[in-house]
Amino acid sequence: MKIALIGLLFLGLGLVALIAWAASPWSLSLSVSTPPVVSVETQLPQEQEEFASVLKVLSFNLGFLYGQGSEGPGYELRDRDYYLKSLETLAADLRSWDADVVFLQEIDFASSRSQDINQARFLAQKAGYPYVAEATSWRANYIPFPYWPLRNNFGRMNSGGAILSRFPLEDHEVTLLLKPLSQPWWYNLFYLHRYFQRATILVGDKKFKAINLHLEAFDRVDRMSQVELLVKKVATETIDFVAGDFNMLPPRASKTTKFYVEEGYDNDRSYELMRATGLSEVIPDEVYVKDEARFFTFPAWAPDRRLDYIWFRPGPKIMKAEVLPSASSDHLPLRATFQIDGPRFNPYSQ
């Protein structure tokens, strides 16, 4: 009996040690860090206007470039060739989309599930973005999801958000947000952080403060709390652009429930709370309601809702905003073009 109890004790201690190792380095609380901006030697020549008059911005949740099934059901581990092909395809798309600044969410930096490829630096090098800011929001030695079979577990995780830019970046800061209080602590040990990633973009003689983010998908109370925190941050730091996956619906969306992958949109005031920032959205309500389907961003293979947004402070003038076709992710990318200055020319050049 005594030997059996000792055996059970050691088994329990071993299980605790295994969970602690798998979830390490774990965090349940809000934290702030200042990772350095990375300079990348690109494969494309860099030609920048000294005084750019137009700024093109793109936001895209990559779903780590898995495509349909990345959220769990039907997921199977894919090999390195699959991810290299997906990265090459997206790099070609990025070159054709011609954005100056790209805000990415759910991008892997060195994760087992995507064959340990730093997707941000690969895309930056291939698509011509010499400045990269990485925000790790999900790091663990082993993520046991999807739960079975074990061969499909995500395993070692290093993932989050990234900003790719043709223009220099500075003042990079990452704020990891509290995990959902509605979930048990052991669940949150392995759950990702939602985050705000802030950086300043140096465009000629202008500076634009921007936030890249990914907000809570499955807990609307938690999501609204995150937006309330964002409103304060935008006000105190005078943010010019906020882009990312907000996991919220426009207030005049005709459908708010019974979606593929239900994410809890009923009684969600996140969009209304965002109005308190004083920022404008690139697709206004009156434009959205005229043709909702044109602006749906999820799921990519059969879009039925809009989850991705770009907000901006008065000053830059919106010229065009559009959802672009793509088969790289479970989301579709959103691109916006802004006039940030009048065209400049030298009258004595001719």
Image (spheres, helix red, strand yellow):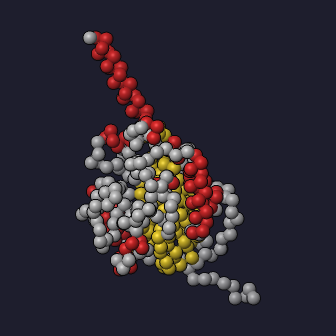
Whether residue 213 appears in this view of the structure is no
Query: Quadrant location of the C terminus?
Result: bottom right
Q: Residue at x 48, y 62 (%)?
A: 60
Q: Nearer the viewer, residue 92 or 302?
A: 302
Whether residue 294 appears in this view of the structure is yes
Quadrant for residue 167, please give it.
Answer: bottom right
Question: x and y percent of residue 254 in the render?
Answer: 29, 71
* Up/down of 326 relative to 313, above or below: above
Q: Residue at x 31, y 61 (%)?
A: 259
Is residue 126 toward the left or the right of residue 350 in the image?
A: left
Question: x and y percent of residue 119 in the render?
Answer: 56, 52
Question: x and y percent of residue 174 in the render?
Answer: 46, 54
Query: Quadrant location of the N terminus?
Result: top left
Q: Residue furthest top?
A: 2
Q: Residue at x 59, y 48 (%)?
A: 81
Quadrant for residue 347, please give it.
Answer: bottom right
Question: x and y percent of residue 279 in the render?
Answer: 40, 72
* Up/down of 150 relative to 79, above or below: above
Q: Residue furthest left?
A: 267
Q: Residue at x 57, y 69 (%)?
A: 97
**How many numbered marks have been drawn onto this rendered protein structure?**
0
* Up/down of 24 relative to 128, above or below: above
Q: Nearer the viewer, residue 256 or 157?
A: 256
